[in-house]
Image: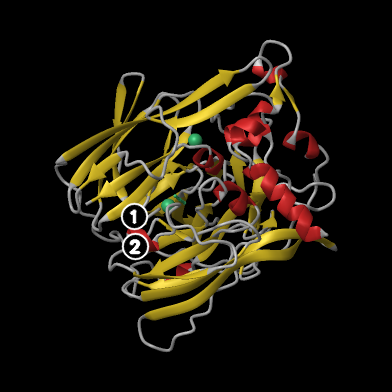
Amino acid sequence: MKRREFLLGSAAFALNVTKAMAGMTMSGSNMAGMNMSGAASKSTKRIRKLPVGAPLSGLAKLVNQSNAPAVFEATIEAGIASHEFVPGMATQVLAYNGSVPGTMIEVFEGDHVKIAFKNRIPDQASTIHWHGLEVPADQDGNPTNPVASGSDRIYEFTIPEGSAGSYWYHPHPHGQTSEQVYRGLAAPFIVRSKNDPLPTELGDTVLFISSVSLNADGTIAENTAADLMNGREGDHVLVNGSKQPVLTLPPGSSHRFRIYNATNGHFLRLSLDGHSMTLVGTDGGLITAPIKGFKELLLAPAERAEIIVDFQSKVGPVTLSGKAYERGWMGGNKPPAMTTSLMTFNLAGPVVQPVTLPEKLRDIVPLGEPTARHRIEFSENMGMTKDAMTMDFLIDGKSFDMNRVDLKARVGEVALWEIFNNSDMDHPFHIHGTQFQIVEREKNGSKTVAPFLAWKDTVNITAKETVRIKLRHSMPGLRVYHCHILEHEDQGMMGTLDVI
Ligand code: C2O
Ligand code: CU
Ligand code: CU
């Protein structure tokens, strides 16, 4: 039975990763010569082609069940659903309310949100984590608060004023986050402001980027050893659930996009066929003023950007592509360095006038002098047994333990965090329950001060780089911070912060 197969598949991955890694045997003396078995060998026959060129889909919305003002109430059920990536071929996915990507939430600042969560994923605990939002620790779907398979819980929180931005939600059960996300559980969570400074003529289009790998029989491929090591880069990058969709817009128009990197392990180095992009927002909402002239924009896993594009007045296609990015690949099966098309904007119809942007978007108050300091270090540790290899992804030399407190903080204090990536690949750092401000980056002895103020919840840290950030938690409770390559997070690259 289908269902059984699915469960077995999950169980195979749930076995601890060291075992999966032990399936990799060394042949020859370098890692590129690695001969993989186990999960990897099952995945050799893949679907290499998906239909392209369909009109960009809108995302299914989560309907508000409440009539009360400033209240958003809904039910989210996570469970097995059938989805057609290939027409006529059913793929069993995990879906929020049956939809992949999941149902998009749209609320206003100040709204009270009450979500009834039903975990209908067979045999696996889950949670809903509200990525980037400042919600009470016990409502944030942390791995410390799993919801057992078949059971329900309520998540309830109030959206803070001033937090308008592009957030998202996804599962966070320890050890199974990566799998539940790559099988389909992730969705945007948009917080709107009642006084958005950007003109409505710009439109507002969400581009939710995920990826999928499909076996020849239509099932979702399990993580290979290379995926576990580097973070899963699915074979097909999808925008709002489909491959290389097309959005038709008038030539000369200015348009607003909220771009999400909701993949487990792709680094999206976005470019727009020579068009330049104007940055207006980051993970935690608008920046203080539009910044023009971006020829490319790197979004590491979990990062978001809000941009305005002024399209040229000549008709024709403009491609949004992901350029090759050197993220420090480990082992064999390195994907070829090439530019991939993500989607196309088709400029057609009468030419329209560009929209003038306001000079100022909002105030961001700098976090000020820190009164606490933390230093953490990301590292990888390669181990070898007689004929197999193991890999650990660590923070401060330790693997995640939810019963251990790694760092402590006080409510309201401003802390300077120094995060050193003492490894050979990029790792995007993320922390729960707050947004931070990047202070500076340091690499090979040279420092670069953050070029502008912005609210962020995820920051990429390249190999051997140090990033300094300032942050403040306004609510008590246990939070986690981790690498947002979800395979690394599952393999222990996560720590705990107790805010008192
Ligand atoms: Cu996107 Cu710990 O989360
Ligand atoms: Cu998060
Ligand atoms: Cu990582």
Residue at image location 47% in from the left, 35% down from the top? 427
Report which residue position mark 2 lands on.
Answer: 135
User: Label 2 amino acid?
Assistant: Val
* Image: 457 above or below 138: above
Badge 1, how many Cα within 10 Å: few under 14, some, many 20+? many
Instruction: Mark 1 and ligand 2: say if the CB distance to the nearest ligand atom is below 8 Å.
Output: no
Classify mark 2: helix, strand or loop: loop
Report whether residue 81 is seen. yes
Residue at image location 72% in from the left, 54% down from the top? 7
Proximity of marks 1 and 2: CB atoms separated by less than 8 Å:
yes
Residue at image location 69% in from the left, 64% down from the top? 80
If you read the primary sequence from the N terminus, does the residue marked by circle 1 or circle 2 appear first?
Answer: 2
Front-most of 405 and 39? 405
Q: Position of residue 215 (x, y in %)?
A: 79, 46
Please give the label number shown on residue 451.
Answer: none
* Image: 72 above or below 311: below
Q: Position of residue 52 (x, y in %)?
A: 75, 55
Q: Position of residue 280 (x, y in %)?
A: 38, 55
Front-most of 244 and 409? 409
Where does the N terminus fall, quadrant-wise?
bottom right
Residue furthest bottom as drawn = 67
Residue at image location 45% in from the left, 31% down from the top? 394
Q: Is residue 92 left or right of residue 205?
A: right
Report which residue position mark 1 lands on.
Answer: 433
